[in-house]
Image: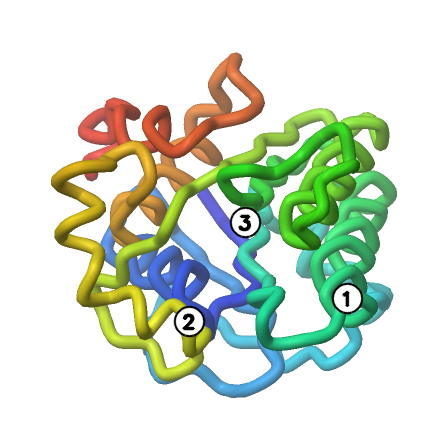
Amino acid sequence: MRIIVTGATGLAGEEVVRQAIANNKITSITAIVRKPMKLQSPKLQTIIHNNFMDYSGLKDVIENNDAFLWCLGISQSQVNKTEYERITYDYTIAAATAINILNPGMVFVFLSGAGADNSETSKAIFARIKGKTENKLKRMGLNKLFIVRPGGIKPVHKNPNAAFFNKLMIPLFPLFELFWPAMVISSDILAKAMIWIAYHEPSIQTFENMELKQLPMETLGL
């Protein structure tokens, strides 16, 4: 399988790339990023791309891959509401539009989050905008759309690009895992789950945190 990954310098996206490099069923990885990656592999191609509203220059890339794992995102604590919506909603929908035109058979796995509000009425910006993005993706008629809703992501590798709030949470993750396991997922498990979903194309479209942790990933050699 040949995959595209966005957000590949962030916590989740970088781990998706790392797990894809280690997986023999993934033959090619294209990371679309704003800056170079530290990870290196013969399977990995990095494309520096600055305008995530425009995919006209990536026509061949989209046409020649099997799955698009969308991990691009930002914490709502790092930007204002307008910028958060532009990154979370506008960028995602622009990519999905390009897929519908250039490669409608492509798998699209959208990294959403626990608490995404499909009623779009939540006072929390994160929940409202993630829910709005999910709703729009579903209305676009993507042939192979999957949505993953992880809880708090526990990093298994240090990532300097992680939000400050996420870094503060790291010492608390063992307690969350012990008392509230449904609220936490390790970054490697999340990455493996996203790859599993892209590869197997299951009948379920939306995966909550515990469902991601319970996937039979050994069937993909994970």
Residue 184 location (% of width, % of height): 30, 44
Query: Which numbered disc, 1 or 3, marks the residue closer to the eye?
Result: 1
**Going from the N terminus, do you reach mark 1 or mark 3 first?**
3
> In this figure, which residue is indicated by the disc labeled 1?
81
> In this figure, which residue is indicated by the disc labeled 3?
69
Mark 1 and mark 3: Cα distance apart in space: 24 Å
Residue furthest front in the image: 123
Colouring mode (rainbow / by chain / secondary structure / one colour): rainbow
Residue 61 lies in quadrant: bottom right
**Could you say which is closer to the camera, residue 135 or residue 5?**
135
Q: Does residue 24 appear in this view?
A: no
At label 3, which amino acid type do we have? Leu
Residue at the location (30% across, 65% down)? 169
Residue 93: which disc?
Answer: none
Mark 2 and mark 1: Cα distance apart in space: 17 Å
**Going from the N terminus, do you reach mark 3 or mark 2 first?**
3
Residue 59 location (% of width, % of height): 78, 60
> In this figure, which residue is indicated by the disc labeled 2?
165
At label 2, which amino acid type do we have? Phe
Look at the picture and state if 69 lies above or below 58: above
Callout 1 secondary element: helix
Residue at the location (74% across, 73% down)? 80
Look at the picture and state if 72 lies above or below 222: below
Other-residue count near label 2 (Cα within 10 Å), few / some / many at <14 / 14–19 / ≥20: few
At label 1, which amino acid type do we have? Lys
Callout 2 secondary element: helix
Query: The C terminus lies in which quarter of the figure?
Result: top left
| Horizontal arrangement in the rendering, residue 2 relative to residue 81 (left or right) | left
Residue 131 location (% of width, % of height): 70, 38
Residue at the location (53% across, 59% down)? 5
**Going from the N terminus, do you reach mark 2 or mark 1 first?**
1
Look at the picture and state if 124 lies above or below 57: above
